[in-house]
Image (cartoon, helix red, strand yellow):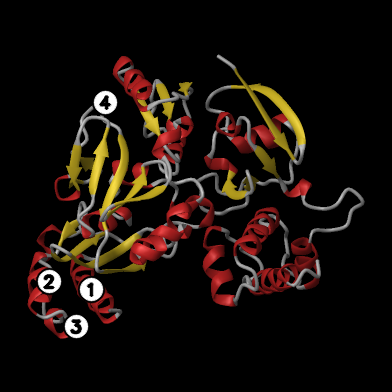
Amino acid sequence: MENFAYHTPASVADAAKLLDANEDAKLMSGGMTLLPTLKQRLAAPSDLIDLAKIPDIKGVCRDGDELVIGAMTTHAEVHENALVRELIPGLASLAGQIGDPAVRHRGTIGGSCANADPAADYPAGTLGHGATFVTNKRKIAADDFFLGLFETALEPGEIIVGVRFPIPVWSHYQKLRHPASGYAVVGVLVAQTKSGVRVAVTGAGPSAFRATAMEEALTKDFSVKAIESIKIDTADLNNDIHASAHYRAHVVTVLAKRAVAAR
Amino acid sequence: MLINVNMTINGKAVSGQVEARTLLVEFIRDHQRLTGTHVGCDTTQCGCCTVHVDGKAVKSCTMLAVQATGKSVITIEGLAQPDGTLHPVQEAFREHHGLQCGFCTPGMVMMGVDICRRHPNADEHTVRHELEGNICRCTGYQGIVEAIMDASAKMAGGKA
């Protein structure tokens, strides 16, 4: 990889200043996607701003009806955290299905969401729970966050500091794992929240999306039967060597049914 | 521009000057000459380069040396006792024939130790799930899985 200047700011404000001052700078959280990208020379930032030394954007706490997860909290920490396991076990389970143990020890929820890989698990996890991203500038609902392939609502100089999850009544994540990469060929999160049923899909399209027809059907009748004949439109789905759009559409329904059956 | 890095490797304080882009595995192998840690794929998939950083298994090809500053790193060379007594996971690999060519073995053993730490009395399903980031092209995994299950049981029972 090309060399770069390396920074370890002690606060989010300092990280934002470094971002503003260096046009070709990049933020690094766990580096599980960024470092492989740099090795392949798909990116060559002038500056790497490592968020690891910022103390207050890591860890899990409860704030009323919400669980707040710091952006630099690793997948392993979310998977093993007692509060997450108690209050949102579906999210703890999702985190334990990301990559492999070594990746889970480094990769973070903030990094995964900011990267917005179409096959990453957390986009379905945040969208499905109706989470809110807290940045150094504002709050962004997950519904407004994932805009497209590797594209989010984050503006230049904007840094995710945490994710707020409304504690659901119940949620469950089902994933068809790519056997080599560990990414989701398709992943579906079904949640019963205080504001209704949510069904979020990752891996199938250019970015995570909600299966609204399934949400409506499950709101009327929360049963496997209610969604078994609902098929996602294949027009916008990914079509690649791993799976055709038609196959992915089929798997979305299968995984959604399995998730509902787990209730 | 070179950056100073300081860390402990296998309990010994080490320091050096590296480029920002120097990977932890390069620092371990090329600077510290600890060549037990292997580089297989260099793309975060095979797990041959697995070491422990502050007690947790990580892939040292996907971490910068500067990111390990101030941390405690354990490599395969740091597992056995100074008198040569093998770590229970190493002993189990020997007993269960958990290796053939040996290239993946340092990473398998380091991940095995991490699995035993997190899963006392790990069952087969757990071990196979936890080994998803470590690739072996010789053994078919059977001996590796048996070795880690055995070590996990022995370590949980305090016999090791």
For the residue carrying disc 4, how many other residues have a C-alpha within 10 Å: few (<14), some (14-19), or many (20+)? some
CB-based contact (under 8 Å), mark 4 and mark 2: no
Q: Which residue was labeled with disc 3?
A: A224
User: Please, what is the three-letter code of the amino acid marked with disc 1?
Assistant: Ala
CB-based contact (under 8 Å), mark 2 and mark 1: yes
Q: Is residue A243 visible?
A: no
Please identify the quadrant where the C terminus of chain B is shown: bottom right
Please identify the quadrant where the N terminus of chain B is shown: top right
Q: Which residue was labeled with disc 4?
A: A157
Q: Which residue was labeled with disc 2?
A: A214
**In the picture provided, is A232 more to the left or to the right than B32?**
left
Alpha-carbon span between mark 3 and mark 1 = 8 Å
Q: Determine whether the residue tagged by mark 2 lies in a helix, strand or loop.
A: helix
Residue closest to the eye, A159 or A11: A11
Alpha-carbon span between mark 4 and mark 2 = 37 Å
Alpha-carbon span between mark 1 and mark 4 = 37 Å
In the rendered image, residue B57, in percent from the top left (x then y), is placed at 60, 51
Q: Which residue was labeled with disc 1?
A: A256
**In the picture provided, is A164 more to the left or to the right than A47?**
left
User: On the image, which quarter does residue B108 sit in?
Assistant: bottom right
In the rendered image, residue A131, in percent from the top left (x then y), is placed at 23, 52
Residue closest to the eye, B130 or A237: B130
User: Please, what is the three-letter code of the amino acid marked with disc 3?
Assistant: Val
In the rendered image, residue A261, in percent from the top left (x then y), is placed at 26, 81
User: Please, what is the three-letter code of the amino acid marked with disc 4?
Assistant: Gly
**In the picture provided, is A90 more to the left or to the right than A142?**
right
For the residue carrying disc 2, how many other residues have a C-alpha within 10 Å: few (<14), some (14-19), or many (20+)? many
**In the picture provided, is A228 more to the left or to the right than B23?**
left
Q: Determine whether the residue tagged by mark 1 lies in a helix, strand or loop.
A: helix
Residues indicated by labels 1 and 4 sit on the same polypeptide chain: yes
Q: Determine whether the residue tagged by mark 4 lies in a helix, strand or loop.
A: loop
